[in-house]
Amino acid sequence: MKKILKISLVLLTFIGFVSCDSTDDDTSYLNDRTPVAYFVPGNSGTLLVEEGVTRNAQINVGVSESRSYDRTFTVSIDPSSNAVEGVDFLLPNTTFQIPANSIVGSFNVTSGDYDASSLAGKTVKINLVEVQDTDVIGPRITYTLVVIRYCPIPETYMVGEYAISDVAATVGPGNGTENFASSTVTISTSATDPTARIFSASVLPAFNSEIETVTLYLSCGSFSMSDVLPGLSCQPGGANPAYIFSTDPDNISTYDLDDDQSFVISYIEDPDSSCGGPFESSFSLTKL
């Protein structure tokens, strides 16, 4: 007997907010003029390891008040890091300077041995230990750097208009629709990640009017995909778990830099079993 899958649309409202808790808001420390220091503008980043090329990740430390003289700051490698100093990355010094009359100092972490790198990536956690003449260190005191193998990709590769359609899908066709609506999508590069290719697509169009953003990551001949969250669930009242798409770690899609005319991207449909999954699924992209 054919299984009928019923999907209930969940309206998800995302509200951005700024916390009033002083532990979350660095600027609150300025109320009593206590100088603070923390990693800026954020506390995470990526170091790409390319064969035959030395790459640096610049990490910035900010302070709330400038001084008329140079100030030193000290960092340390957290023992929970699984990237190995001297092999996966290089950090010859642990003491650096914030220049006089400045509120930002920086240091570089350098890429290590390409053969030791991996596509899955390794993590180095860097702690901000001490800043001269700064009594309080703010909440962003640990910087997480992912060290990952990188193979160069031409900027023009897999860019432009592509036809998208399902190859294998379960929930969409089982309910008289598609997982990825057959259409034309425009694939573009990312300003911050040379491995990323980004497009927008309609997902389960019979149930969902949202347009979802999909990011494909190209890593040394293999694809991975960002999670796609169409805001749907088969659970009563739209309860968790949600129905999503995610990378299929056991069925990795591949690419060839000599050909960007067509691709089949494998993914896991409904990995958390909201609608009876997980299901092995895929979609195609064909250059127009």
Image (cartoon, rainbow, N blue to C red):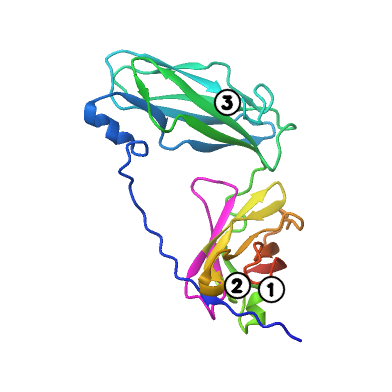
Q: Residue at x 67, y 60 (%)?
A: 260
Marked residue nearer the N-terminal end (2 or 3) = 3
Q: Residue at x 34, y 26 (%)?
A: 36
Marked residue nearer the N-terminal end (1 or 3) = 3
Per the rendered image, the range of residues in magenta is: 185-212
**Residue under label 3:** 78
Q: Residue 262: tell me if it is visible.
A: no
Residue 180 image-quadrant placement: bottom right
**Residue under label 1:** 169
SS under mark 2:
loop
Task: Please provide percent x and percent y for residue 202.
Answer: 53, 72
* Marks 1 and 3 close (CB-CB < 8 Å): no
Residue sitting farthest toward the top: 69
167 or 139: nearer the eye? 139
- The amino acid type of the residue labelled 1 equals Ala
SS under mark 3:
loop
Question: Is residue 173 part of the magenta span, yes or no?
Answer: no
28 or 42: nearer the eye? 28
Q: Residue at x 54, y 16 (%)?
A: 93
Crowding at mark 3 (Cα within 10 Å: few <14, some 14-19, many 20+): some
Crowding at mark 1 (Cα within 10 Å: few <14, some 14-19, many 20+): some
Q: In which quadrant is the N terminus drawn?
A: bottom right
Judged by depth in the image, the label closer to the viewer, 2 or 3, is 3
- The amino acid type of the residue labelled 2 equals Phe
- The amino acid type of the residue labelled 3 equals Asp
**Residue under label 2:** 180
| Whether residue 226 is situated above or below residue 180 in the rendered picture | above
